[in-house]
Image (cartoon, rainbow, N blue to C red):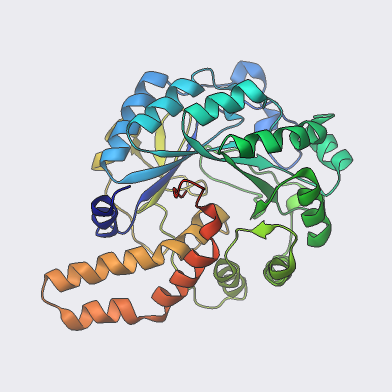
Amino acid sequence: MRVREWLRLLARGGPGFVQIALTNACNARCRFCNFSRLAPKDWIMADPARLRRGLGIMAAEGVRYCVFTGGEPLLYPHLAEILGEAQGVGLQSLLCTNGRLLNRPKIDMLQRAGVSHLIISIDAATAEEHEGHRGFPGLCRELQELLPYIKDSGITPVASVTISRLFADFQAMGDFLAYLGFNLATFSYPLTELHSTYLSYADHETVTFTAGEMSAIFRSLRRWKGRAPITVLNPRLGLRELERQLAGRRVRFPCLAGYKFFYIDWQLKVYRCHYLPQVLGALEDFAAIPPLRDDCHVCLIDCYRDASVQQFLAVSLAEAWSELCLGKVGPALGRLLRPGTFLSLGAILETRHWINRHGRCN
């Protein structure tokens, strides 16, 4: 983006970010996810014509980054068309996948369509356990062969690891990810309930932890991050915030879902996030959806909570600019000088590895 565009977006609190579930179809058999329980007769694919129009509307409203997910988005028959449309309207695309359907022609298609990051799920610290959980024999060997090709294509691969009882040691997981060929990893926090249509959760023993256990896990991840053999993208500040929340302390960075972040399902309904049931409208009505700022912190979902920590700086700058335009110099300085603004800058610098070789970021 050009400098003028960045400045315009900063005045609005930074660029918008959406996760679009193109389909509820999935070919995996994960125990901690309800997508795997849907029969093919219940699979739904997002309407491509509506989605194409909606991408343009979102771009005009300041959305710049789209994570395309599912289910398994590589099962979506119009994927190349939709990614091409996103590229055409100026959206940066990332794609989440379990990796089973990846091959060189698909990677070439993703590269042509401007996908910057390929986020690949890894569940366990050994090939046997990961492939057994997913139901994909031989997958790890295939990924190990494809990762150099993905990197050479200009796409940044990121391992996405759900924290679960399928692995008990971060070091073992980090060593396995490095062995497969990953340089970057992000850890997703376990989900046992969601109230939107999203199905990437299950009330299963593999992802059931007490608050005390989760706090200890966040603390362990935060401390291990500095010596990990791969770069861990979860910001320490975000982990500390969730530790504070689990301990019943005040949350300093309210979630920005419904303001800068949104979830859109395969029926093209717009939700503020995966967790809450509130439908904000249809995708075509995105421009008319009023922003929500209610200091919500009812969940531990990393893609909203960690991202909110990072975007707090942009929000502070936008609020300070609004105050300054009204001639309120003191309140403007107050927005800029509050501790959270400087802490957010640190989180941004810590997660700079999301920026790819072309200078684009997710």
Q: Quadrant of residue 295?
A: bottom left
Q: Residue furthest left?
A: 327
Left or right: residue 297 compared with residue 199: left
Give the vertical position of 243 relative to 28 (above or below): below
Residue 50 x, y percent position in the rendering: 35, 23
Q: Residue furthest bottom?
A: 330
Q: Nearer the viewer, residue 87 or 201?
A: 87
Residue 34 x, y percent position in the rendering: 67, 36
Residue at coordinates 65% horizontally, 44% vertically from top-left?
201
Give the vertical position of 226 relative to 205 (above or below): below
Q: Residue furthest right?
A: 128
Left or right: residue 268 compared with residue 25: left
Q: Quadrant of residue 136?
A: top right
Left or right: residue 95 compared with residue 295: right
Q: Quadrant of residue 234?
A: bottom right
Q: Is residue 212 visible?
A: no
Residue 1 x, y percent position in the rendering: 33, 47
Q: Nearer the viewer, residue 33 or 239?
A: 239
Residue at coordinates 37% horizontally, 53% vertically from top-left?
260
Left or right: residue 72 compared with residue 197: right
Q: Nearer the viewer, residue 127 or 276?
A: 127
Q: Is residue 6 visible?
A: yes
Residue at coordinates 50% horizontally, 23% vertically from top-left?
79
Give the vertical position of 214 relative to 336 (above or below): above
Residue 272 x, y percent position in the rendering: 41, 48
Residue at coordinates 57% horizontally, 65% vertically from top-left?
235
